[in-house]
Structure formats: structure tokens, C-alpha cells
Image (spheres, rainbow, N blue to C red):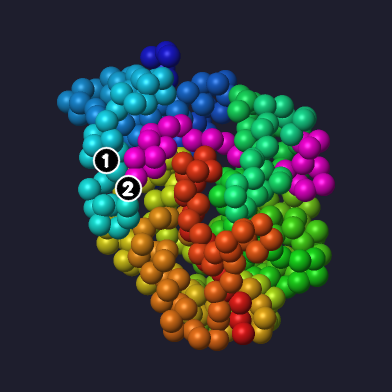
Amino acid sequence: MTASIFNQAAQVIRLTQAGTPADAALRETLGRTRHSSAPAARREISRAVFCYFRWLRWLETKESLQKQVAAALDLQTRFDRHPASFKTETLAARAVPDWLKEEMETSEAWLRQLQAEPALWIRAKGAEAAKVASGLGDCTPAPASAHCSAPAAYRYSGTRDLFLTPEFKAGLFEIQDLASQLVGHACTPQPGQTWWDACAGEGGKTLHLADLMQNRGLIWSSDRSLRRLAKLKERAARARVFNYRAAAWDGGPRLPTKTRFDGILIDAPCSGVGTWQRNPHARWTTQAKDVGELAAVQQRLLDHAAPALKPGGRLVYAVCTLTRAETTAVAEAFSSTHPDFEPVAVFPTSDPGPRSAVFLWPQEHNSNGMFIAAWRKK
């Protein structure tokens, strides 16, 4: 790896030390060199930055950032070759913040998954899935687990910049983590139904719902951020998704529409612990107090959105975190205070259980961690 890579990685890290999230710092730094640097170099810089945060507590802080980055990359290589050489006790003490042990069980398998480099998943449009995978190459279909499957999900292991491919520009696939895709399948939306993606963000799950609905019916997509909704509009145009309406919603009791829905998805803001393999910088910026504050927000979102569901409608709650306070505690509180909602199977067509609340663990799916719960309005 060249000195230039180490220097640019150090530049990104300095931006994070000033308060910029790692992904934004990478966009800022790499955006200035997009036309002058090769995609391979940009990938190496991103990898170096994420390795630095993944192995942060192993590094000598008195060394220069360049030397720390080099040491982190060496640790990553050693872990990839011989993961057993890292003791579980050491991983528990160094790979995650100290407050986490009060919020969840940290198993050996999960800790080791955190230190591995993450998989890249795409979601091909249903009718074009096999053709897209063949055209891109280096695509492996997601295996079906005991309780869920994502037939249009492929793990991409190639080196192409996917955003520059003709298939992406034609709207034939999205870059979407496997766990996020499974949330869409948990919704089981049907063509012609009316759904509400209440915390839509930039629209990844809205686009998936539209694909599952064969672009028929209607999806209301709301978010408190107008910038995110503008990005959703851009993504929907590229993907040729037209059966949606975007509206701002701050999560309060005043809803963006008087429509009553066949289904509501609340992909709520959360601490993001489930994304720590992909975004190791967040391990060191998320605080214990955030968990409690976000759990209260999640409960309010469910309370305020629930009245918009039709009798017999489906409510799905999803968070990309694994803390008790934001997952089972929120689901149990909602069930206890809303007797007109009954828990139902998260994956009704494939789970032999079936289970009304499911954890998707990174070490089981090679994806982000996710919690999903589902109810039916009586």
C-alpha cells in the first residue's frame, strides 16, 4: 500500500476526530479525487479507515495516524488468516465499548463477526435478478435460512464500482444489505395494497416494497428529513418506481395523511449496533444514553402510527440494533399497551416456528444485525 493511501486515510480520520462521521468524511475526501484516482485506490482508503476503527483499541495512540493505520491493516490480515489467535476475552474487552455489556449479550461468534470485513449485498429487481447477477459477475445468491429467504439478494465479491455499471444506471438493482431486504419480505406486501413506510429515509425499503408489489397499489413514504426524501425521489426515478407519495412526518401524533393502510413499516431510528461490522466508527460515537433516548422515540413512533392501520392490517417494526431496550422491550411494551394488536409471524410463509419477533444475527446471515417484530390489528 502506498504512502498516499496512508496519508489520505489519516486525513479522513482527522475529520472524524473533529466530529464528522466516517462515511461522510470519506465522501468529502474521496469526492475531491473521484476523477483523478482509480476506484481501487478509493477502495483501499475506505478499507484502511474502517480497519483503523475496527482495531482502534489495539493501536498505539502515540504513533502517527499513518503508522496506526498500517498496524490496523496488519491486524486485519492476521485476523483474516488466523481468527482463533485472538482470544475471546480480548475481543470482548477491546472490540466494543464497555457500556454494551449492560445492554446485550456479546457472544463469541458475534464478536468475531464484528472483526471480519463485511459482505456487500445487492437486491436485483425480481424479474431481472438472474440476468443482473450474470451481467455483473461475481454474484452469489443468498442462501435460504431455516426461517427466511431473499430470492433477489446476491452477495457481490467483485471489484467494480457498482454505481458506474450500466445495470445500476438502468435501475436494475440496488445496493442493499441482506438484513434490510429481509425486512421487506417480513412485510409481505401484496400488489394493489396501500402501505406506509413511516421512517423511509432515502427509500431503500420503499423501493423494495414497490418491487414486491409489482409497482401496483400505493406506498406513502415519510421521513422527518426533506433531504432524505429528495434522495428517495431521485432513487425512485432511476428504479422506475412510481406508486409512492412522499411526505414529511416528524413522528408526532399529526400524521402525514388520513389514509388507512393495509400495512405499516416502522424502520425506526436506533443506536445502529447491528451495523457495527460495516461501520466500526459508530462503536466509538454511540453512547449508552442514546439507547434509552432512542427506545422512547421508537415507542412513540409505534404509538402514533398504529391508529392508521386498517383492521386486519399488518404492522412491522424493525431496527438495525440488538440492544434489549430497543428490541424486545419495545415490542413487549407495545403489545401490553395495545390489546387491539396481536403478535403474528414475522415470516409467515417460511418460518416453521413461527415467531412474532426475530433477531437476525450478523454471524448467521453475514449481514447487518436486525430485529423485526410483527402484529395484526384485530
In the figure, is residue 235 to the left or right of 253? right
The residue indicated by pointer 1 is: 92
| Residue 279 falls inside the magenta stretch | no
Tell me where residue 85 sits by quadrant: top left
Task: Kindly tell me whether residue 297 is visible in this rendering.
Answer: no
In the figure, is residue 295 to the left or right of 161? left
Tell me where residue 261 sits by quadrant: bottom right
The image's mark for residue 66 is none
Picture layout, residue 115 above or below residue 376 = above
Give the residue type that dot 2 points to. Answer: Thr
Give the residue type that dot 1 points to. Answer: Ala
Helix, strand or loop for disc 1? helix
Task: Compare residues 89 and 124 and report the one nearer the observer.
Answer: 89
Picture layout, residue 346 above or below residue 131 = below
Q: Which segment did they paint magenta?
A: 106-132
Task: Kindly tell me whether residue 154 is visible in this rendering.
Answer: yes
The residue indicated by pointer 2 is: 106
Q: Position of residue 218 (x, y in %)?
A: 75, 69
User: What residue do we see at 60% from left, 39% from top?
Assistant: 121
| Residue 121 falls inside the magenta stretch | yes
In the figure, is residue 299 to the left or right of 19? right
Q: Residue furthest front?
A: 352
Q: Position of residue 51 (x, y in %)?
A: 38, 30
Give the mark, 1 or 2, whose residue is nearer the N terminus.
1
Q: Residues within 10 Å of mark 1 (few under 14, many from 20)?
A: some
> From the image, which quarter does the N terminus lie in?
top left
Kindly indicate whether the residue at mark 2 contacts the one at mark 1 (C-beta within 8 angstroms): yes
